[in-house]
């Protein structure tokens, strides 16, 4: 056991630089994960918020999105791979359909459901009396959504993004199966060469990045969520302010 720990420490000291070093692999992992979560949030939050506000088509959209949860990420990678290869043959600026694109598609499909569903559910669950009071004061529908419903539902919305980000970081290791880099490269290559030290090192790096992602989004929640709505800070007399119509 002591020898294994020593080999693991030596691996970390010797494999930090270069294109195959864990600094570069960490950056690759963060690139594809960040792109998937970012685009899923840009699409899922506005769409989920608007559908939650209007109540139109929400049930069908949530059902369709949740079907995606039932498909394993590995299955999405397998489906996306031949599609991205064919697209790469026809689009000049895409060098290959391997690597980034099938990995991104699988992670995007994983990231979208919790973001969209949490946003839709959160906006729909805002107190109807508060919304009607805002309408009675002449506040526009857009202002009701952005100034009343989204601030009040922000804890649940951020929880969806946070959950999505951690899941994506943990699942991005699958990219190594389709010739992408990232931290999963160490796990896949370690299994191929029966290098237990490399497997454990890769797993530790993925776990550490997942924990740091959770911590970073926790700090982000403190900045984004209004103070009265943060967990543990909402007292019995706390009320959401209604914006003026001006």
Image (cartoon, grey):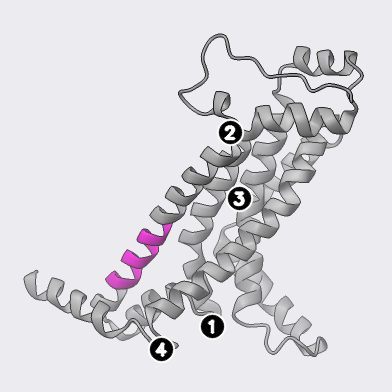
Pick the front one: 167 or 149: 149
Label 2 to label 3: alpha-carbon separation? 26 Å
Residue beneath disc 4: 18
Picture quarter with the C terminus: top right
Say the numbered circle drawn on residue 179: 1
Q: Is residue 226 magenta?
A: no
User: At which x and y percent is residue 215?
Assistant: 43, 49
Q: Which residue is mark 2?
A: 155
- Can residue 55 be seen in the rendering of this structure? no
Where 117 sits versus 206, above or below?
A: above
Magenta stretch in the rendered image = 200-210
Q: Quadrant of residue 81?
A: bottom right
Residue placed most toward the observer, 165 or 218: 218
| Residue picked out by circle 3 | 70
- From the viewer's side, name the closer residue of 231 and 94: 231
Is residue 37 placed above or below 98 in the rendered structure?
above
Query: Where's residue 86, x and y in %?
Result: 76, 83
Secondary structure under the numbered disc 4 in the rendered image: loop
Does residue 215 appear to the left or right of 178 in the view shown?
Answer: left
């Amino acid at each position: 056991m002591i020898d294994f720990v020593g080999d693991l420490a030596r691996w970390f000291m010797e494999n930090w630089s270069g294109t195959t070093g864990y600094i570069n692999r960490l950056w690759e992992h963060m690139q594809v994960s960040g792109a998937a979560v970012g685009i899923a949030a840009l699409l899922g939050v506005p769409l989920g918020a608007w559908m939650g506000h209007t109540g139109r088509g929400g049930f069908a959209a949530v059902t369709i999105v949740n079907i995606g949860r039932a498909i394993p990420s590995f299955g999405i990678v397998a489906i996306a791979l031949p599609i991205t290869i064919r697209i790469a043959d026809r689009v000049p600026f895409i060098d290959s359909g391997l690597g980034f694109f099938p990995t991104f598609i699988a992670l995007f499909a994983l990231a979208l459901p919790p973001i969209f569903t949490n946003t839709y559910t959160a906006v729909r669950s805002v107190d109807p009396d508060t919304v009607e009071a805002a309408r009675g004061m002449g506040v526009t529908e857009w202002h009701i959504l952005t100034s009343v419903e989204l601030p009040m539902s922000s804890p649940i919305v951020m929880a969806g993004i946070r959950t999505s980000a951690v899941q994506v970081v943990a699942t991005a290791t699958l990219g190594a199966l389709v010739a992408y880099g990232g931290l999963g490269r160490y796990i896949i290559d370690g299994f191929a060469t029966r290098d237990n030290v490399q497997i454990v090192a890769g797993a530790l790096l993925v776990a550490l990045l997942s924990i740091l992602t959770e911590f970073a989004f926790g700090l982000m929640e403190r900045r984004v969520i209004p103070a009265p709505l943060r967990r543990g800070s909402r007292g019995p007399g706390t009320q959401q302010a209604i914006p003026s119509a001006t």
